Amino acid sequence: EPEVTQTPSHQVTQMGQEVILRCVPISNHLYFYWYRQILGQKVEFLVSFYNNEISEKSEIFDDQFSVERPDGSNFTLKIRSTKLEDSAMYFCASSEGGPNSPLHFGNGTRLTVT
Amino acid sequence: DQQVKQNSPSLSVQEGRISILNCDYTNSMFDYFLWYKKYPAEGPTFLISISSIKDKNEDGRFTVFLNKSAKHLSLHIVPSQPGDSAVYFCAASWGKLQFGAGTQVVVTP
């Protein structure tokens, strides 16, 4: 069964550094998402992406965050200047249809900001 | 702003019995509801969904019930199996998917 893959599985970075989290969505999917889960808290929506542009973003997704689909297969999340509170599991997801179709999630990247 | 609430953080059930997980929501604009299951170190996995025009959807051992007037949905798993031990997330969609906090289910032999 096709799956969403995320790399790396664990990223450790120093506060203030830039990180790029990478995702390869399922190939025939058209909608892409990033979610995050801070330890012990709920899974939170960050951003959705369709047709090469952001379709929706949450209040968490401020100017330090950006997403890109650079080459038709990868979908990246960049955090420009990491803060301690950015430490979380970041999940990429994709879906065939829009919000009313099931999302398929990757196994996540654990980001630790020190 | 907790629009999707799962008030039971954990549930323990014996193998073979029914597991009932509950979820409440506040936004009447939600029109699509899903349940996801999550094992440690893995991403959420889609289990079952229901559109707001239905009140029940069944898939094998899993049944989701939707009560729109009460803004409540539930997931029934019957019979429960040890492999069902996981965190279960309720999610609701209106443009974007919002998750509840999750319920940890432990199925004991």
Image: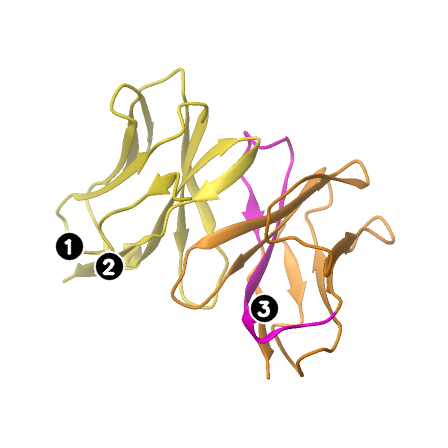
What type is the residue that disc 3 sits on?
Asp
x then y, percent, for residue B44: 47, 53
Q: Is residue A113 visible?
A: yes
Q: Mark 3 vs mark 2: tell me if same chain.
A: no
Which residue is at a point 65% across and 47% down the rendered structure image? A47
**Is B30 left or right of A5, judged from the image as shown?**
left
Q: Which chain is orange?
A: A
What type is the residue that disc 1 sits on?
Glu
Q: Is residue A112 above or below residue B77?
A: below
In the image shown, does A31 or A80 lie closer to the viewer?
Answer: A80
Instruction: Identify the image quadrant of residue A41.
Output: bottom left
Is residue A90 covered in magenta? yes
Give the alpha-carbon distance from disc 1 to disc 2, as whole Å: 6 Å
**Residue at image mark 2:** B82
In the image shown, does A93 or A66 lie closer to the viewer?
Answer: A66
**Residue at image mark 3:** A86
**Residue at image mark 1:** B15
Contact, mark 1 vs mark 2 (Cβ under 8 Å): yes
Q: Which residues are magenta?
A: A81-105
Which color was chain B given?
Answer: yellow
Chain letter of the residue carrying label 3: A
In the image shown, does B75 or A38 lie closer to the viewer?
Answer: A38
Q: Residues within 10 Å of mark 2 (few under 14, many from 20)?
A: some
